Amino acid sequence: KSMAEEDYATALDQFLGALDILPTRNYARPDQNKNAALLAYLAGTCHLQMKEWRFAQDLLEEALRRDPNFGNAHYNYAYLLAKIPLLLDYDSKCIPDLIAARWHCKRAMELNKQQGRVVDEEEDCLVRINEYLETNRQETYVKSKYVTVTKRPFGMRISEHRKVVLVKGAAKEQG
């Protein structure tokens, strides 16, 4: 392991240890949910840096379940969803998560702008996702086991699905 990997592994142990001692969502106060969301985000980001994609995905989803208005978690989740098809060697004609990545990227931009943050990385990520979807639109189909969309995002067929993180209530299509 490189020095950076060891640092991420050490930080990850600390974040997960702290997350374990916080109450579960059902009993937590709102500030505890925000703290748990931050810890899950930090742990997920460590897994992302260590290229442990599935662990990163689980923790970033946990962060978004605990705090659906966490802009940086939306961005890292969008980044992860946009990267997974390339990293895990999916069928090149199947792009299972780019539609959801676009939605999470837009949400990150919206939330971070509200907080007065610069959103250059989010804009760059969104441009790359849109370019890829536009150039591959004719042969692209989207496959996901998560949420069926009734109002389709641009370029998506009626029977297709997309992945979103479910929060309280029904998932909302905003893409």
Image (cartoon, grey):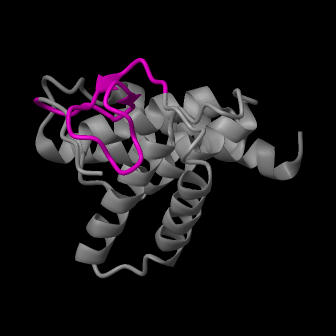
Residue at (73% x, 48% y) in the render: 7
**In the rendered structure, does residue 85 fall within the stretch colored magenta?**
no
Q: Main secondary structure of the magenta part?
A: loop
The residue positioned farthest toward the right in the image shown: 1
Looking at the rendering, which quadrant does residue 32 occupy?
top left
Tell whether 128 sits left or right of 153. right
Q: Which residues are magenta?
A: 143-169
Tell whether 23 sits left or right of 119. left
Q: Is residue 34 visible?
A: yes
Looking at the rendering, which quadrant does residue 132 occupy?
bottom right
* Residue nearest the observer in this picture, 151 or 129: 151
- Establish if 169 lies above or below 72: above
* Residue nearest the observer in this picture, 86 or 20: 86
**In the rendered structure, does residue 156 fall within the stretch colored magenta?**
yes
Where residue 42 appears, as percent x and y from the top left, is 50, 47
Where residue 46 appears, as percent x and y from the top left, is 61, 44
